[in-house]
Image: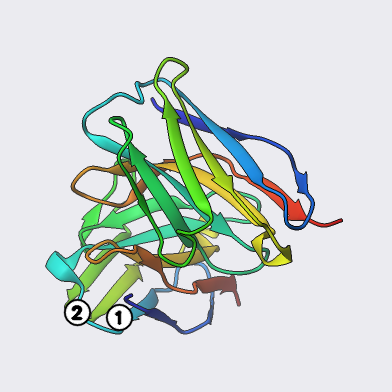
Amino acid sequence: EIVLTQSPGTLSLSPGERGTLSCRASQSVSSNYLAWYQQKPGQAPRLLIYGASSRATGIPDRFSGSGSGTDFTLTISRLEPEDFAVYYCQQYGSSPWTFGQGTKVEIK
Amino acid sequence: QVQLQESGPGLVKPSQTLSLTCSVSGGSISSANYYWSWIRQPAGKGLEWIGRIYTSGSTNYNPSLKSRVTISVDTSKNQFSLTLSSVTAADTAVYYCAREGLTLNCFDPWGQGTLVTVSS
């Protein structure tokens, strides 16, 4: 199975700053089938990005995804207070679908 | 818009069988465009895809759990279900149901999740 490694484990930033989250795959992700989710405490994950770079319905344009092959990035251009959460990547290019271990974005 | 809601016992004894149901509202589980999946998350840990079912009853399971998992669908009730046999404390987790795209196999939306604790 494809193992996804996210870095850093925790990202400490201030509102208004730019956040850059990384997701590295143990082997190439077919057709860039890579998604990003946001999870807040006590809530289910919410889909942000699919196909590595396409925003899901209703997701603000401050969220953007990029990358291909084995290296993917989620960028939050200007952090809003509601963006402090845990972010997970997920690959759906090769079954079984797998998730990264998460990056926590916390208020500095 | 489609909403999903998990239900089932919150406490299961070791070696017994965990059973959960996901009720779908605002859309039909018989839609040709989606799979219906189960995902779990142990406390403070990451997410693990358990498996999925299509409206036809066709299933796919994570090999790590395949020997213990069964997912079924009841189109008349617009529900799908998860059973996990021979549970241990390692199966303690929040269990989510989610809709999975037929071609874009990511998960949207998700149910709110239900905590299942395995303990005697």
Q: CA distance from mark 2 to mark 1?
A: 7 Å
Q: Quadrant of the N terminus of chain A?
A: bottom left
User: In the rendering, which numbered label is found on residue A101?
Assistant: none
View extreme (left): residue: A31
**Marks 2,1: beta carbons within 8 A:** yes
Q: Which residue is mark 2?
A: A28
Specify whether B70 is left or right of B17.
left
- Label 2: chain letter: A
Q: Is residue B58 visible?
A: yes
Q: As rendered, which of B91 and A82 lies closer to the eye?
A: B91
- Relative to B119, residue B1 above or below: above
For disc 1, the marked residue is: A25
Q: Is residue A78 visible?
A: no
Q: Position of residue B108 (x, y in %)?
A: 37, 43
Scheme of image coloration: rainbow
Q: Using the image, name the chain to which the residue with label 1 belongs.
A: A
Q: Amino acid at mark 2?
A: Ser
Residue at 44% over, 50% down: A46
Q: Position of residue B90 (x, y in %)?
A: 67, 67
Name the quadrant containing residue A61.
bottom left
Q: Residue A65, percent across and down?
A: 26, 66
Residue B88 drawn at (x, y percent): 71, 63
Q: Are marks 2 and 1 on the same chain?
A: yes
**Seen in the image, is A38 located left or right of residue A65?**
right
Q: Which residue occupies 54% across, 68% down?
A: B46
Residue A66, placed above or below residue A59: below
Judged from the image, the secondary structure of the residue bearing numbered disc 1 is strand
SS type, badge 2: loop
Task: Count every numbered label the image shows and give the total.
Answer: 2
For mark 1, does the 10 Å Cα neighbourhood hold few (<14), some (14 to 19), or many (20 or more) residues? many
